[in-house]
Amino acid sequence: MAEVKVKQESPDPVQIENRIKELCQQFPHGITDQVIQNDMPQLEAQQRAMAINRLLSLGQLDLLRNSSGLLYRMKDSQTASKMKGSDNQEKLVYQVIEDAGNKGIWSRDIRYKSNLPLTEINKILKNMESKKLIKAVKSVAASKKKVYMLYNLQPDRSVTGGAWYSDQDFESEFVEVLNQQCFKFLQSKAEVARESKQSPMVQRNSSFATSHEVWKYICELGISKVDLSMEDIETILNTLIYDGKVEMTIIAAKEGTVGSVDGQMKLYRGVNAIIQPTGLVKAPCGLCPVFDDCHEGGEISPSNCVYMTEWLNF
Amino acid sequence: MTAQEVRLCGLLLQEHFGDVVEKIGTHLLRSGAQNLRTIANETNTPLDLVKKSLCVLVQHGACEFGSGRRGPGSPVEYRADSERVLRILRYPRYIYTAKTLYGDTGELIVEEVLQRGHMTLSNTVKTVADRLTHNMEEGRNMEYSEVSSTFSKLVETHFLQRCPPVAEMGAAPPTTTPATHGAPASVAPPTAESNPDCYKLPPVKLIGCGKRRHSGDDTEDQRGGKKAKMDSESCGDEGIYWQVNFERFHQHFRDQAIISAVSSKLDQTSSEIVRTMLRMSEVTTTPSAAYTQPLSANEIFRSLPPNYSISRPILDQYLTLLVDDPMEFVGKSGDSGGGMYVVNLHRALANLARATLESVVQERFGSRSARIFRLLLRKRHLEQKQVEDFAMIPAKEAKDMLYTLLSENLVQLQEIPKTPDHAPSRTFYLYTVNQLPTARLLLQRCYKTVANLIERRLHETKENKRLLEKSQRIEAILASLQASEAEPEQLTEVEDMITAPERQQLEALRRHINKLDCAENQVDETVFLLESYIFSTRTK
């Protein structure tokens, strides 16, 4: 007797797809091939592959790779609707930009990652910009460079420059004003401490101000339109240290006291310069721009130096 | 010896000793050690002039002689000392210091010794007494004993010292050391300090008082001169010559600089404490020491000046504050005796030199460039981008300032390649400031500045020579008329020989020359700080 061929009822392709979709919804992190196989053991590999391919081309499944193999994940229906009009290349570029997060990605990098020619990339980017899916943000480091990121994301600080940049321009006057205000605050605190005529330890300790106090003072002054964090104030205070007007110490503070970061607090204090402007700059030669060309008997010499003449007649 | 130093030394020698000495001096400075015959030949000066100028230089300690390079038999070689010649620039500061510490008497003693180079005690005392008596009112005389006591005070505090004894030349080696018979004769010339008696006063009693010199007294002077010579022979201290101890004065200047830095950084009381500490270690610390001797808090408390009555705990607080200060002027070296404290001399000098460099950058290039400079001093090596970020200066301006500083050699560029082929796009370029080479650079600039100021002063004098001569003649005529008691009309007639614009010109000239002199002294202060700093790093 011939073997009875058990005719398998070939399941409907649509049914397979629906089953796969249900499985995806059950496992939102993604399902592997193994899972589908376990669920529908009677399905042949070929049919399974066909169903998955159809779902992928319809844009309802996302194909991911992890360490153990391929994963299929349900695609967000919203984004699925957005991409309906786009083709595969656009979807690829969109994915690449999405991966870059809020730092944005440069067009050349997109080209490397997607292996698409430049003209295609440009067309796609223009297309997506008009559909309001992505936006271009000018980077503050190189003003000609444009990075692309998803439309609704906030650009990262490293791209816009943070509080000191407004529209890619470094706000030097703002920094200067903050500089002077901080210095005045510290100086007046030191003055008060000196006038109080207490014991020297107390005097010195009361002339210190923590970075938190300075931050509060600046916030209350209200000269800044942008919210400044304590780190911003600390960078300003650092510039005062480099001006030689302020010195800093770090003390250990209890966790939880106001303004302490990792158990430390930074204290700042206004100081005076340790010497007067030095003798060399009191002579015109100390500031002379043509100092190296000056020789006795030459065009420029001490005998006919105009700077000296002016200085002597002052 | 750099070209700038030689030029400055030449100008100083010419002003103080004349053209011949200048020629010989600069020749020696340029060519190192030479013997007499070579000097005469190369400078085309007659032998006796060469001998006289060498005498002048040796008398002032600017020239040393030693046996020749080819062994004890070769002719004596002379070597000029540029450092010593540069000290001439600082004479006004030495004299002023002596005046503030020991009054007019001290000032005149130091001035006399500086002018003559080496002098005996008796000679100095007599000359100074005579000068002081001359300036006093009629009928009062300066006692020799007063001058002697000031002299001995100067010696006690080491401001004056005996000149080192001259090494025996060509004599047979002493019999006590026959083993060194074949030893090379080029022994280093004995320094003043190696003489154990260098601060011992000779047992000479000088009785008398200064003689007033009247203006018509030439013949008397001649006889007086002879008499003075006979007097000094009988004083018993010939052969013992005294010179000014420059190192001690430098120590004093350095202490003053440290004290004023402490007082401007902290407050008056802290600077008094540091002054006390430095005073206590004046004679116990060698000039090139890095730290003073440790002093206990008890000692400091006892030695504080009586009008600064602060209590013991307050003193301890001040000392703790001084130790904690980031400038690190004072350090704590132990806990015995209530705490042992030292003054960090080398570190203080380094801080003062650093402040000098910063102030020069600030005055020349502006406060933002000074910010970049200080930033690089603190952080050592930084990239272009980091400089902009830390200093909060817009990128374009920061780049501009950095390149200006780089072109003036105040800032250096350090390349760190990432790849073996040093490709510029794959190399780190770091900006850095090296304090010591920059200090040397500024020092040379100072020398050139002082030379320029001196030349300008000479030029101004030369331009107005005619006017100056005329005014001198007028003054001489006026003086002689006054002495012979002429009538007032004659006096006014003579005075009118100088017209008003000429008078104005003279006044302007005097102001200019004063200003140039002042500027020389001010630049010399910078020179002193930088030289001390460089010297302190050399002996490490």
Image: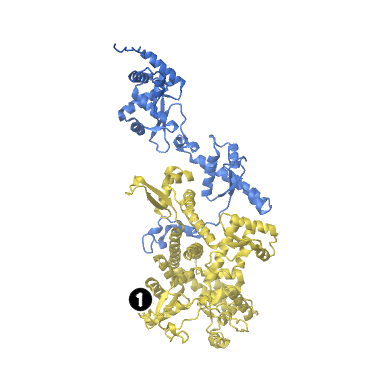
Chain colours: A blue, B yellow
What count of labels does the image hold? 1
Percent across and percent down for residue A228 are 54, 37
Q: Does the image show residue B66?
A: yes
Q: Which secondary structure, mark 1?
A: helix
Quarter holding the N terminus of chain B? bottom left
| Chain name for mark 1 | B
The 10 Å Cα crowd at callout 1, few under 14, some 14 to 19, many 20 or more, is: some
Taking B320 as reference, is B231 above or below it? below
Which residue lies most toward the front here? A1
Among the 4 quarters of the image, the one containing residue A144 = top left
Q: Which residue is mark 1?
A: B43
- Residue type, label 1: Thr
Taking B141 as reference, is B303 above or below it? above
Taking B472 as reference, is A98 above or below it? above
Q: Does the image show residue B215?
A: no
Among the 4 quarters of the image, the one containing residue A23 = top left
Asked whether A286 or B279 is in front, the reply is B279
Percent across and percent down for residue B513 are 49, 65
Asked whether A221 or B387 is in front, the reply is B387
Percent across and percent down for residue B502 are 48, 65
Which residue lies most toward the left here? A2
Q: Is residue A296 left or right of residue B119?
A: left
Asked whether B187 or B55 is in front, the reply is B187
Percent across and percent down for residue B262 are 59, 58
